[in-house]
Amino acid sequence: QVQLVESGGGLVQAGGSLRLSCAASGSIYYISTMGWYRQAPGKQRELVATITRGGTTNDADSVKGRFTISRDNAKNTVYLQMNSLKPEDTGVYYCNAVGLTALRAPFSSWGQGTQVTVSS
């Protein structure tokens, strides 16, 4: 089993910054892609940003130039630096990791989510 634990959410004013972290642990052989998704009230979960093991990133258009995803492969940890936050960034942010377990079985695991609230 692979567990993901997120941290760093909170309440911030528009224009402010937050940094989210997500650490993966458990029976991990290899993590290929890690990413952040978010879900606003009454809406579907959407992609925020992903990053491959080699560092290739994919960002949603709505966050380009404001959010930066990064990862530390040695720590199985992914980060999301969020700057110039807007009220529409409010939601529950979920971390995802895709890879292989120590038994070489594929996995796709999700964190429990962390609330981000941006006030206007």
Image (spheres, rainbow, N blue to C red):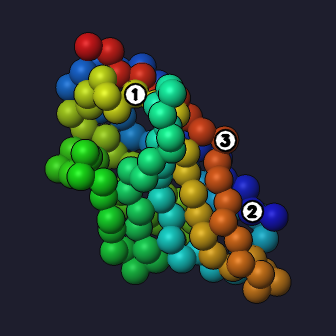
Looking at the rendering, in which quadrant would you find the C terminus? top left
Q: Earlier in the sequence, mark 3 or mark 1?
A: 1
| Residue placed under numbered mark 1 in the picture | 90
x then y, percent, for residue 10 = 46, 24
Amino acid carrying mark 1 in the image: Thr
Q: Is residue 7 left or right of residue 81?
A: right
Q: Residue at x 48, y 59 (%)?
A: 35
> In the figure, 36 relative to 14: above or below?
below
Report, in whole angstroms, how far the alpha carbon at label 3 lies from the one at label 2.
13 Å
Q: Is residue 42 left or right of residue 4?
A: left
Q: Which mark is residue 65?
A: none
Amino acid carrying mark 2 in the image: Val
| Residue placed under numbered mark 3 in the picture | 112
Looking at the rendering, in which quadrant would you find the N terminus? bottom right
| Residue placed under numbered mark 2 in the picture | 2
Q: Residue at x 57, y 57 (%)?
A: 96
Q: Residue at x 26, y 31 (%)?
A: 85
Amino acid carrying mark 3 in the image: Gln
x then y, percent, for residue 97 = 59, 64
